[in-house]
Image (cartoon, rainbow, N blue to C red):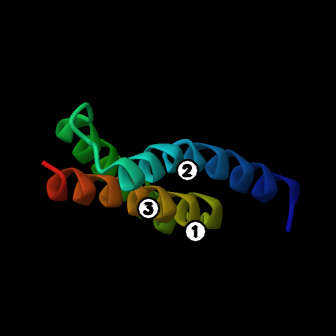
Amino acid sequence: MDTITIIGLLAGAFTTLAMAPQAIKSWKTKETRDLSVVWLVVLAVGELIWIVYGALIASLPIIVTNVASVFLALLVLALKSKYK
């Protein structure tokens, strides 16, 4: 694995992990009232577009980290829907 790929994976890992505390907190507290649905939808759509872009340029770091990010965004969106 080359240095550029490692840097891409690290950058993606940190931005993906930024969403993890919110997902964990929402799951544990069952509280999502302060989270914006618009923000979650825009975030998920943006991440889906990044996945398409990553596939078009064959960039594993972009694909892998955005798949994880969109999963977390959709998880929080599902929790928001569940815990109205």
How far across and down, in percent of the image, does residue 9 sit?
70, 56
Query: Residue at position x 87%, y 54% from top?
Result: 3
For disc 3, the marked residue is: 51
Q: Can residue 41 be seen in this snapshot? A: yes
For disc 2, the marked residue is: 16
Residue density around tag 3, few if under 14, some if 14–19, many if 20 or more, within 10 Å: many
Residue density around tag 1, few if under 14, some if 14–19, many if 20 or more, within 10 Å: few
For disc 1, the marked residue is: 58
Label 2: state its secondary structure. Answer: helix
How far across and down, in percent of the image, does residue 27 sit?
38, 56
How far across and down, in percent of the image, does residue 35 sit?
26, 35
| Left or right of residue 34, residue 1 in this image | right
Label 3: state its secondary structure. Answer: helix
Amino acid under disc 3: Ile
How far across and down, in percent of the image, does residue 82 sit?
17, 59
In which image quadrant can residue 49 be found? bottom left
Label 1: state its secondary structure. Answer: loop
Q: Earlier in the sequence, mark 1 or mark 3?
A: 3
In which image quadrant can residue 75 be found? bottom left
Tag nearer the camera, 2 or 1: 2
In which image quadrant can residue 1 be found? bottom right
Amino acid under disc 2: Thr
Query: Residue at position x 39%, y 58% from top?
Result: 70
What's the CA distance linking mark 1 and mark 3?
10 Å
Query: Which residue, as the protein is rendered here, is positioned at the far front?
Result: 29
